[in-house]
Image: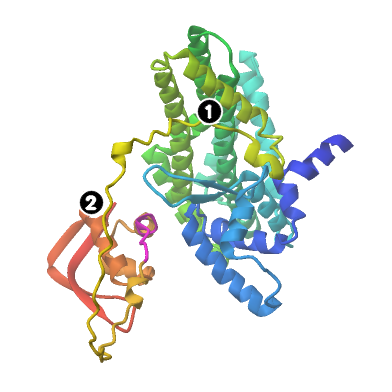
Amino acid sequence: MDYSTLDYLRKHDTTWRLLTATHAPLIVSFLYATFIKPNERSLPFDQVSTQLDDYLFHLRDREGEGAFPKTARQYLDDWANGTSPYLRKYYVQGRDIPQLDLTPGAEKAVEWLQGLQPRQFVGTESRLMTLYRLLQEIVQEAEQDPAVKIAELERQKTELERQITRIRSGLVDAADPTRIKERWFEAEDTARKLLADFRQVEYNFRTLDQEVRELIATSDKRKGELLDEIFEQQDYIRDSEQGRSFNAFWEFLMSPQRQQALENMTTAALQQEALREVDDRQFLPRIGYFLLEAGEKVFRTNAQLAEQLRKYLADQAWMEDKRILQLIRGIEKSAVAMRNSPPETDIFRQFATLDQPRLAIDLVMERSLFEPKTKVALAAVKLEEADESVDVQALYNQHWVDEARLRGNIRRLLHEYSQVSLAEVLQQYPLQQGLAELVAYLNLASKDAKAAVDESVEEVLPLGDAGRTVRLPRILFTR
């Protein structure tokens, strides 16, 4: 924590830049309401832009029209650009609309500001017991003397037998509400930090991939040596501390027995009288679903990075033209060298030049023959104004239905219930785009092998506009 390090962090660290930004209250409050509070890993750019537009409308109504002069899209572009962005803007394969996700630095800033709020209950005993337990596990794992290990296990065995004897005799200690609350809040805080760590893990995977690509772009080695280096870097991504830790976590989380045990423990904990009045009773019971969703995104990112390296390896086998290969490497080297020192704005247009791709050949026979102009004779007809009026506004009222959002609505309900109908889904998440959104739900049901249609029962589904309804057979979604 010397002066040079802190000065560098003040200029380049995302967390520091966000905390000292001009519109930091706007940025932090919007990112918290859009990504952190509903636990959204990524959202389409258009959806985030619409939400920010509504958010700015309410703020301008309260703070004045000149408080935030830019549009929602301009603010999002500013937050997603630069060397230390608050949002990561990227494209998903098969989609034309970019996606937005929080960067780890922005999430750290939001988490730090959350810690500044006063807490009504701070559990010190629970944290001390956690510290004691962790240190005890470290000492036990590091111990190499078999006699010492056996003695410690015998001590634990004696203590367990003493507790069993005490319980059998009818002496059961009453549950302490304070301790139960302490451990509940500590578990909730640990779960939230674990979800926040997933963005950092994904960011580290992408950083590793970027380092590999920069090494490939600037390498002057022969083809065989370069291929060996690519394989080594691919193994490095998989065998790094981040990779091994995430693989161990994913194997632990993918066990159905552990998922069920986690759900049973949270459900049983909420039955305690001491936790009847806790504010958030929905977060921990759904932590398994949140962890699976976040872990799946990191898993896909890791698999995508490995796939990109394999594609690069396959492309190398077809690059036999040495001149083309030298030109590509020269462009990659220049791009990497100028990433941190881009050219000035006024000379950017002369940054790179390209030769004319072909000769301009104009043959005489390609010219068209002379054709005299045709004179158009206009009839003197008196035009009469028509009485019909056509509403052309419907041509512009086109919108796009996000099936990923609808699929998420169904998955959230299936996490709580083993089976839900389309009517129950619409009751929890009413239609926002009318008939088009209902058709999207039907399309998801037709693609889902676990969905079923009960034609013996009909349901009346609201379309969400002007009180209109539609009658359909019951559609059921199951786990």
* Residue furthest out toward the left: 456
Between residue 95 and residue 238, name the one nearer to us. 95
Question: First in sequence: mark 2 or mark 1?
Answer: 1
Between residue 166 and residue 175, name the one nearer to us. 175
* Residue at x 35% of width, y 70% of height: 433
Image quadrant where residue 337 sits: top right
Query: Does the magenta portion include 272?
Result: no
Residues packed near mark 1 inside 10 Å, few (<14), some (14 to 19) or many (20 plus): some
Please tell me whether residue 397 is drawn above or below residue 7 in the rendered image. below
Mark 1, residue position: 243
Amino acid at circle 1: Gly
Considering the image in quadrants, where does the N terminus appear?
Answer: top right
Q: Position of residue 365 (x, y in %)?
A: 28, 38
* Residue at x 49% of width, y 56% of height: 45
Mark 2, residue position: 447
Element assignment for label 2: helix
* Residue at x 62% of width, y 23% of height: 141
Over which residues does the magenta segment extend? 399-407
Amino acid at circle 2: Lys
In the displayed structure, does residue 329 sit left or right of residue 60? left
